[in-house]
Image: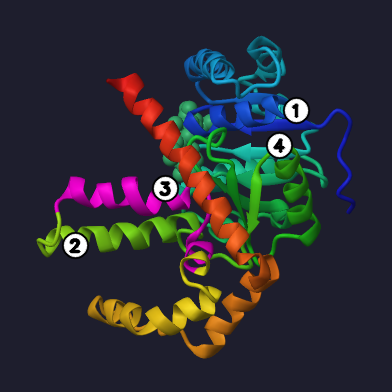
Amino acid sequence: MSVSLSEPTKIALVGAGAIGSGWAIVFARAGFHAVLNDINQAQLDAAKRLIADRLAELSDFGLLAEPSETVAARLTYDIDLGAAIHGADLVIESAPERLEIKQALLQRLVEGTGPQTVIASSSSAITASAMAEALPDRHRCLVAHPGNPPYLLPVVELVPAPFTAKDIVEKAKTLFTAAGMSVVTLAREVEGFVFNRLQGAVLREAYCLVRDGVVGVDELDAVIRDGLGMRYAFIGPFETSDLNVRGGIAAHAARMAPAYERMGAERGQHDPWTAELVDKVADQRRAALPLSDWEARVAWRDRRLMALNRLKRELREADA
Ligand SMILES: NC(=O)c1ccc[n+]([C@@H]2O[C@H](COP(=O)([O-])OP(=O)(O)OC[C@H]3O[C@@H](n4cnc5c(N)ncnc54)[C@H](O)[C@@H]3O)[C@@H](O)[C@H]2O)c1
């Protein structure tokens, strides 16, 4: 199977709630024609209104390259599922997160589309293995998990099942990239994928700290809001650690590993950063950023933080 796209490329979005409407904005903004489908006509009508409002707001913020009406005109709405998905290059289902709904829907999507169609599920937690195991054409199914709303958080996690065909993953990657998404492809299915595992790790510790009377809820939020989260708006935890210690992440691990290991053990979690693991991470960081460029990158991070501080001050002043 080739990864070539039909011309014009057709995107079908099944389930027009928060996520389906969000995907509609993502694809229409990038120039794709997309059709939205829902089992409920009132929901389709509501989605059309919501999308028009959101596009107008995006335009007010200078985040659309074209008038919002031009973008909205790329979207059509069809209560007939068969017609909506017919001939689509990519179908994304964003129906409620219930296994029996997803299983029945994926069956209809597989049956109603041809061998070139990628069938993606926005599922937050249910894997493609669980949803599509019993389907004849299951090799066309995978998860494409977005953040909410996807038109403001551009990352999408592609999570193939062991049975998903490689060229289907490639075609999905091509389409989501063309839609302006930052595509992260997981090597295998894990519960929560990466987004929610990271979110869960932070939230678990946050609950423990409140439970143990170490800190209050708003104070804990302040540590993220006014601290960690400001860095994470630009760089992830690996790059953060890499830039925090001269010598990069290997030097960071040499200094910090024992303390982090004790903190993990306190929570019953024994996941030492072995020399081999640290080497693996450090090798990837050095490939991304040679140590000779380290100072320049630290200065770049600080300029980003200056811009963010200025923006936050402007937003505070506008709120006052
Ligand atoms: N909301 C989030 O924060 C978020 C983030 C990432 C992923 N997701 C996932 O995206 C999916 C959708 O979530 P949501 O928040 O948009 O839900 P939602 O409740 O806002 O929307 C679901 C829509 O699906 C429609 N629907 C139900 N059965 C259908 C069917 N058989 N065919 C077509 N449409 C059908 C409903 O009428 C509704 O409009 C879920 O799997 C969810 O876990 C949600």
Residue bearing the label numbered 3: 230
Q: Tell whether label 3 touches label 2 (CB within 8 Å).
A: no
Mark 4, ligand 1, within 8 Å: the answer is no
Q: What amino acid type is highlighted by mark number 2?
A: Leu
Q: Position of residue 306 (x, y in %)?
A: 47, 42
Image mark for residue 43: none
Secondary element under disc 2, as helix, strand or loop, is helix
Q: Is residue 147 magenta?
A: no
Q: Tell whether label 1 touches label 4 (CB within 8 Å).
A: yes
Mark 1, ligand 1, within 8 Å: the answer is no
Secondary element under disc 3, as helix, strand or loop, is helix
> Looking at this view, is 259 or 75 the one in front?
259
Q: Position of residue 161 (x, y in %)?
A: 63, 62
Q: Earlier in the sequence, mark 2 or mark 3?
A: 2
Q: What amino acid type is highlighted by mark number 3?
A: Met
Tell whether 217 sits left or right of 72. Answer: left
Q: Is residue 224 magenta?
A: yes
In the figure, 280 relative to 58: above or below?
below
Q: Residue furthest left?
A: 213
Q: Which residue is pictured at 56% across the width and 65% down the height?
A: 189
Q: Which residue is pictured at 81% across the width and 57% down the height?
A: 167
Residue bearing the label numbered 1: 32
Q: Disc 2 to disc 3, how far (Cα)?
A: 21 Å
Q: Earlier in the sequence, mark 2 or mark 1?
A: 1
Residue bearing the label numbered 4: 179
Q: Position of residue 295 (x, y in %)?
A: 59, 63
Q: Residue furthest bottom?
A: 275
